[in-house]
Each structure stands twice: as C-alpha cells, then as structure tokens.
Image (cartoon, coloured by chain):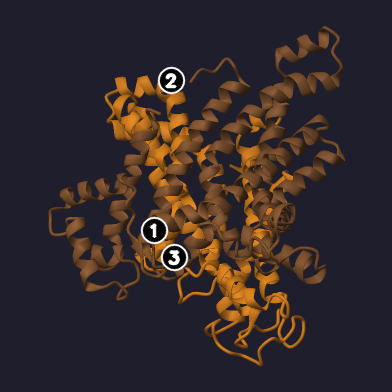
Chain colours: A brown, B orange
Amino acid sequence: MAQAIPVVCAILVLNFLLLRLAPGDAASVLAGEAGSATPEYMAELRQRFGLDQPLLVQLLYYVKNMAALDLGFSFRYNMPVLTLIVNRLGPTLLLMGVTLVLSVGAGVTLGILAASRAGSWRDTVISILALVSYATPLFWIGLMLVVVFSLKLDWLPTSGMETVAAFYQGSDRVLDIARHLILPAVTLSLFYMALYTRLMRAAMLEQAGMDYVTTARAKGLSEGRITLAHIVRNAVLPVVTVAGVQLGGLLGGSIVVESVFAWPGLGLLAFQALFARDFNLLLGIFFLSASLVVVVNLGVDLLYTFLDPRIQV
Amino acid sequence: MPGFWRRLLGNRSAIIGLVILAVVVVVAASAPVLFPGSPFRRVDRPFQPPFGAHLFGTDVLGRNVAAGIAHGARTSLMIGILATTVAVLVGTVIGAAAGYYGGRLDDLLMRTTEFFQTIPTFLFAIILVAILAPSIRSIVIAIAVVSWPAVARLVRGEFLALRHREFVHACICLGMSDRRVIFRHVLPNCLSPIIVTGSLTVATAILIESALSFLGLGDPNVMSWGFMIGAGRTFLRTAWWLCTIPGMAILLTVLAINLLGEGLNDTLNPRLRNS
C-alpha cells in the first residue's frame, strides 16, 4: 500500500504534464473535441482548473479534481468521462482475466512439457511455436484468425461482445458472450503464452539442477512427483512475477485487440478517443488503467506470499 | 573478434536470423532502385491479386503492395534502430549512474524506472504520439520512452556486480574521474548483455511501431507495414493479401532479429548456454 500511493501521485503529475503538452490551451483539451464545447463550459473549466494561475497551482487544482475522480466531460459521448470509463471496464476486465488465465495456464503447461523432455522433438516444436508467437504482431494474428475461423469456416463471430439483436437471456447469453470472447482472448493470449512458456521452461531447467531435487530423488520419489510437487512449485514463481509486471502490457495489447474485434471495452474506447483526438478521455483512461495496474500488482504480491510462504509482504 | 564471428556463425539460430535479416536489409536498401518514386503512387487497377502483373498485387487505391513492402522495410528498420539507440543510450546512462553511485540516487532512479515499467506502456506510447503529432520523430521518442527501463535495470545490475571489483578500486586509487571509470573501465565489461538486450529491443520497437501505425498513428509521409495492414483490414474478405503479406514481413523481420539476439546471447555469454 505504501508504494502504491506515490505511484498514483506520479501518474497524476505525468498526466498533467501530458495535458500541458497537448496542442491548444488546456481548457480546449479538457473539453475534448475542439469546438464542440459551449463557451460557458470552457469558462467554467478555466475557473475550475485554475488555468489563469501559475503552473504549480494548476497542478494542485488538477490533482484535487482527479482525486475526487472528477475526470471531466466528454462532449462526443455527452457523458462524464468517469461514467464512460466505468461502463467499459467490465468487458476489458473479462477479456484480461480470461487472457491471463489462458496465457499463464497454457504457458506453464507448455513450459513443463518442453522442459521435462529437453532436447526432444516435443521441446523443439514447443520452442518454435513460442518463438513464432513471440514475433507475431497481435493485430495481425487477430485478423488472420478472423479470416480462418469467421470468414472461411464461419465458426465464430467476427466482432462485438454479444449478438444484441438476438436478445438472449440467462445461460444463452453467457454462451453467446463466450463465443464472442474466444477469438479476442486467444489473440491476446498467444504473445504472453509464448513469453510464459519460455520463462517456465528456463525456470524448470534451472530448478531441476538444485540439491533439493537430488534429495527428493534419493528418498525414492517418482520423477512425475518430483516434477509436479517440487520443481513446478518453485519454477512457477518467476512466471507469476512477470505476469504481474506484464499487466500493463496486457492492457496495451487489449487496445489493439479490442479495436480489431470491436470488443466494447476500455481499449476500444481508447481507440475511439484517439480517433476523435479526445485527449482528456484518453488521459482519463490512462490514469484509471494505470491505477488499476497498481492495485492488481498489490494483489499479485499477496498471491506471491501464498505461493511461497517464505516471502513476507 | 574473429573468435566471436566463428562462434556466432556456428550457431544455428544466429545463422537463420542473419540470413533473413540480410534479405530484409537488402530489400530495404534497394527499395528506391527496385520501386522508384513514392510507394503511395497509383500504378494499376485496384485489387489485382498477387503473383500477376505485380508480385504482391495492388491495393484499394491501385498502389503496388510490393513497393509498400520494400519501402516499409526501410521505415521499420530505421525506426527500430533509432528508437533502440536512444533507449540504450538513456537506459545505460541512468542504469550506470544508479549502479555506480548507489544510495539515494540509485533509489530515486530505480523508483522512476519501476514507475515507467508499471504504467501501461503501449497506452503511454499512443498518448505521446497523439499529443506530439504523428511523425517519425515522435514515434521514435515514444518507443524510446517505453523501452529504456529494461536497459536501465540491466545496466544497473551489471554495474552493481562490478562496482566493488578490484579493478574498479584500482582505477579510483589511481585518481581517475568517475566518468572515466564508468565509461572506460566498467561499461566495456558489460557490453555483451547490453548488445543482446539492444538487439531484442529492436524487435520490440518494430512491433510497437507496426501497432502504432496500424492504429493510424504512423507518420503519414512514409509507408509502413502496420499502416498497410490497417488500410487493408476492411477488405479482409475480398483481398486477403493486403493484410497477410505485410504481416508476414513483420513476423519474419521480428523473428529474424529475435533469433539473432538469441544467437548473440549464446555467443557472448557462453556460461549461460548450458543452463
């Protein structure tokens, strides 16, 4: 908790600097699309953000407003920025959550499979798969999956989060969303799966040479049990650390993936804000998603103590 | 040095990487000769399929896709190398200062570095490019800003390991200035990991650049692979080659650089090879 607050403050200052850096005066940037705000609102903004005051005072005003979660108003959507972001948070969290589980799960499994027969053809195939996935641009693999699974085979929908016109209820709706979720989640997972596969493989091989493995073997444990109960538990730690660090990256990747699949989350909102050059909305998304990453990282720290009781927060 | 090349050329992934990369570099270098004039120029009727009159066909405006690929290679390589150079320079100076001086300076610099690693970097890059207006310069700045922290942490780690070695103490006892000790004596000892990280950073930089220009944040005056995919996206059903070919180009280039990076890693850190 103690480290989280300075980080959030630093994000605020960075946001303020970016706002100052944007073309036009700060009031017009805060009002979103130039020209669409009323003169009254602009005057109110100038007053509320103290834009006639020295820079440092302006920063204080800005921090005060942001701390009250007053992120301004988006004229394009005719909605407060905060409401807009909160409405889009759900789909993004769903996509990120599924991606996280999928990429860590598949990465750890493939890493174990590769490391347990290091040098075999199985290891080679997994390593090549990881190498190629690691080099593929997310948006491109998304488009290619659309070509294959939606346009050619017609198995899965191309875009969106649900078939709105069908008015599905209950479990039908869940199933419908799940079908829409498959392609975006797989697209976003591939890159991270590759990363975790490589990490897991390296960590497994490193752990396999440790003394405790020799001890386990000496007391007559089977190889399968040594791998699963002893090596994997230690090798998974670096993967969890990196998965935590990569959360911000995952959010960035979701911008690209959501705009490919028209997944109605924060990423698509960021893309639309970018398209309209609505910097205030963009900065609001940046602030909230950066804070989200900080909060989730606190959660990862707790998970770490659970996985490795030797570590204390 | 001849030992280095012999070992590098004895490494399978380095060879594959070097060969693919050489092709990309040759294509990029000869783009103005092979496809003179602007790659944005209209050459034929739109939507000509590949392997006909034009090697990779034409796009929605009748532009030659092959010319776009060749000119796009120049953009990708240039931005990748420029952004990496800036990131490595900044990261090295910050990491070296943190690792060499330690104490509060180290604290401050490492907090800053960690901060830049926690924030959603791609979103940050997008905002930077959008605010600075899309151009080669702003793209290079944005990629460098999100890439330096990894280099800084690496260099700091190396400096921490070398800081209290005898040769460093000897240099200080001889009365050398800090700058001389850092740049002439400590830094050359950690060049190998910096080279390896740098090569991998070029690959990430190319991926970030392609994503930025896919989202419409590329420099409007230069052709780029990401832009080609973004422009061809709407015609996925009818003209598959518009997205597929530039994507393959990105994939192959990034793959080649990663392979070369791995080869360099094996060559420069022989101790790590067996682990």
User: Residue shown at 65%/66% (left/top)?
Assistant: A164
Residues marked 2 and 1, same chain: no
How far across and down, in percent of the image, does residue A154 sit?
A: 80, 68
Residue highlighted by disc 1:
A81
- Contact between marks 1 and 3 (CB within 8 A): the answer is no
Q: Quadrant of the C terminus of chain B?
A: top right
Can residue A33 be seen? yes
Q: Are the residues under marks 1 and 3 on the same chain? A: yes
Q: Which mark is residue A273?
A: 3
State left or right for residue A173 relative to residue B78: right
Residue nearer the viewer, B228 or A14? A14
Q: Which residue is mark 2?
A: B165
Q: Which residue is pictured at 56% across the width and 84% down the height? A: B36
Q: Nearer the viewer, mark 1 or mark 3?
A: 1
Quarter that holds the N terminus of chain B: top right
Residue positioned most to the bottom: B45
- Callout count: 3
Judged from the image, the secondary structure of the residue bearing numbered disc 2 is: loop
Dot 3: within a 10 Å radius of its alpha carbon, few (fewer than 14), some, or many (20 or more) residues?
many
Q: Earlier in the sequence, mark 1 or mark 3?
A: 1
The location of residue A36, given as percent across then percent down, is: 32, 75
Judge left or right: residue B32 versus residue A75.
right
Q: Position of residue B202 (x, y in %)?
A: 54, 53
For badge 2, the amino acid type reads Arg
